[in-house]
Image (cartoon, rainbow, N blue to C red):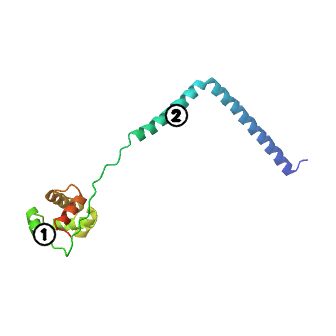
């Protein structure tokens, strides 16, 4: 008569031996497969290696260099700010466009400006586009620089 612990050990031993035998048979089958199809396997490995190398090399060669951005210098004006009314009339800048320019100078986004002055983001974009045309500016920073140098904003 066997004890329960001894029966468990015998069953576990048979299970482990069976598992090892299955692994050995699979390994032998794998080796047979590798020997029989070695050219195809090596060809696939070489193809995968060159594909990976091509993807990496293509990414590094075609990587775009960052565009050079104009450096905007800060315009400092001494004394209290006085709006140049003649320049405002000359450029035909509306009070709303002047307000938008001041908010752009504070660094607010179009959405934030719209929320602050109670208009839609598209309306802010329209005012900004018209303002940029009047100032001859291509971007927000250039408009702010021109506005400060022409004493349109503090």
Q: Residues within 10 Å of mark 1 (few under 14, many from 20)?
A: few
For label 1, the SS is loop
Of residues 42 and 61, the one nearer the viewer is: 61
Does any portion of residue 100 appear in the rendered image? Answer: no
> Do labels 2 and 1 touch, CB within 8 Å?
no
Splitting the image into 4 quarters, where does residue 149 fall? bottom left
Q: Residue at x 34, y 48 (%)?
A: 66
Q: Is residue 94 left or right of residue 56?
A: left
Q: How many marks?
A: 2
Task: Answer whether residue 10 is visible to the viewer in this image.
Answer: yes
Residue hosting label 2:
49
Quadrant assignment for the C terminus: bottom left
Residue 120 spot, x, y in % from top left: 23, 63
* Vertical position of residue 127 compared to residue 8: above or below: below
Looking at the image, tell me whether mark 2 or mark 1 is earlier in sequence order. Answer: 2
| Label disc, if present, on residue 55 of the rendered structure | none
Residue 84 locus on image (x, y percent):
12, 69
Query: Could you tell whether 57 is left or right of 25 in the image?
Result: left
- Left or right side of 38 for 79: left
Furthest residue toward right? 1
At 70% from the left edge and 30% from the top edge, which residue is drawn? Answer: 28
Q: Nearer the viewer, mark 2 or mark 1?
A: 1
Residue 3, image x, y percentages: 88, 50
Q: Nearer the viewer, residue 52 or 79?
A: 79
Tell me if mark 2 has few (under 14), some (14-19) or many (20+) residues whose alpha carbon lies within 10 angstroms of its own: few
Residue shown at 16% from the left, 65% from the top = 150
Q: Which residue is mark 1?
A: 84
Q: Secondary structure at mark 2?
A: helix
């Amino acid at each position: 008569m066997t004890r329960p612990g001894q029966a468990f050990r015998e069953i576990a031993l048979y299970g482990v031996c069976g598992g090892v035998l299955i692994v050995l048979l699979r390994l032998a089958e794998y080796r047979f497969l590798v020997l029989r199809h070695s050219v195809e396997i090596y060809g696939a490995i070489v193809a995968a290696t060159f594909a990976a190398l091509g993807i990496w090399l293509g990414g590094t060669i075609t990587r775009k260099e960052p565009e050079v951005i104009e450096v905007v210098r800060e315009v400092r004006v001494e004394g209290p700010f006085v709006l140049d009314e003649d320049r405002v009339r000359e450029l035909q800048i509306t009070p709303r466009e002047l307000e938008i320019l001041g908010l752009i100078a504070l660094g607010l986004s179009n959405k934030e400006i719209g929320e602050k002055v109670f208009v839609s983001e598209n309306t802010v974009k329209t005012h900004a586009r018209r303002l940029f045309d009047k100032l001859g500016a291509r971007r927000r920073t250039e408009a702010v620089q021109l506005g400060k140098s022409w004493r349109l904003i503090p």
